[in-house]
Image (cartoon, helix red, strand yellow):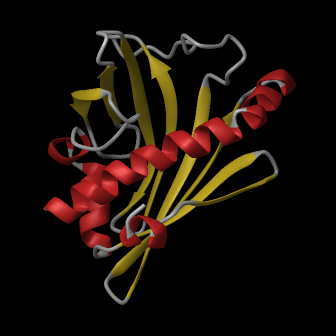
Amino acid sequence: MTESQATNANQANTEEGKLIITRTFNAPRELVFKVWTESEHLKHWWGPTGMDLEVKKLDLRPGGIFHYSMTSPEGDQMWGKFIYQEIVAPEKLVFINAFADAEGNTIRPPFSSEFPLEILNIVTFIEHDGQTTLTLQGGPQHATPEEHAFYRGMFESMQQGFGGTFDQLDEYLAKI
């Protein structure tokens, strides 16, 4: 682990069934927000490590959608989407994240019928001395008690997944 990676290690906790991850990036807030909101940047870092991301649509406005596909090295493809709820540049993004089909319809993920259909995510960006601390809070929307329980049971896996995604973001920010 490099010194940068050690400094930027994910801090994660949970409260009331929400996944909360905090990470500090060595980049100004405007830039971190920009790479979260523009397709030419998202395709370089969003998603699990090793997946290729293709942006089908990005309409950054309340009610707008970020619709994308992720393809594994083996050629397996999954679709996902954000439906933006609130955008306060460069301070906050609120969106519902869901698995989707190629047309953008919300679907169950391929790995479980108990994973919630919709996850409400709140991402905040706070700058201090040229660095940006990002906090992501996510929790199920309109979910059954079983879906909430399944989501809580996936916290460790999701922390690892976001850790890899945020490592990619850290590397990408260092390049631009």
Using the rendered view, name the quadrant where residue 56 is placed: top left
Q: Residue at x 39, y 72 (%)?
A: 3
Count of numbered circles on the image: 0
Residue 125, can we see it?
no
User: Which x, y percent locates residue 121?
Assistant: 55, 46
Tell me if residue 48 comes above or below residue 16 in the rendering.
above
* x then y, percent, for residue 13: 71, 57
- Examine the image and state in which quarter residue 26 appears: bottom left
Image height check: is 93 above or below 88? above
Q: Quick one: 149 or 57, which is closer to the camera?
A: 149
Q: 50 or 42: nearer the eye?
A: 50
Q: Quadrant of residue 116?
A: top right
Residue 88 appears in the picture as rendered = yes
Along the horizontal axis of the image, is 105 left or right of 66?
right
Where residue 156 appears, as percent x and y from the top left, is 68, 41
Q: Residue at x 47, y 68 (%)?
A: 6
Quadrant the N terminus occupies: bottom left
Query: Which residue lies at the image location 22% right of the left edge and 42% below the top edge?
Result: 44
Q: Is residue 97 above or below residue 121?
A: above
The location of residue 115, given as percent across then percent down, is 67, 21
Q: Is residue 152 left or right of residue 76?
A: right
Q: Residue furthest right?
A: 145
Considering every residue shown, the one lying at the far front of the view is 1
Residue at coordinates 40% horizontally, 11% vertically from top-left?
Answer: 101
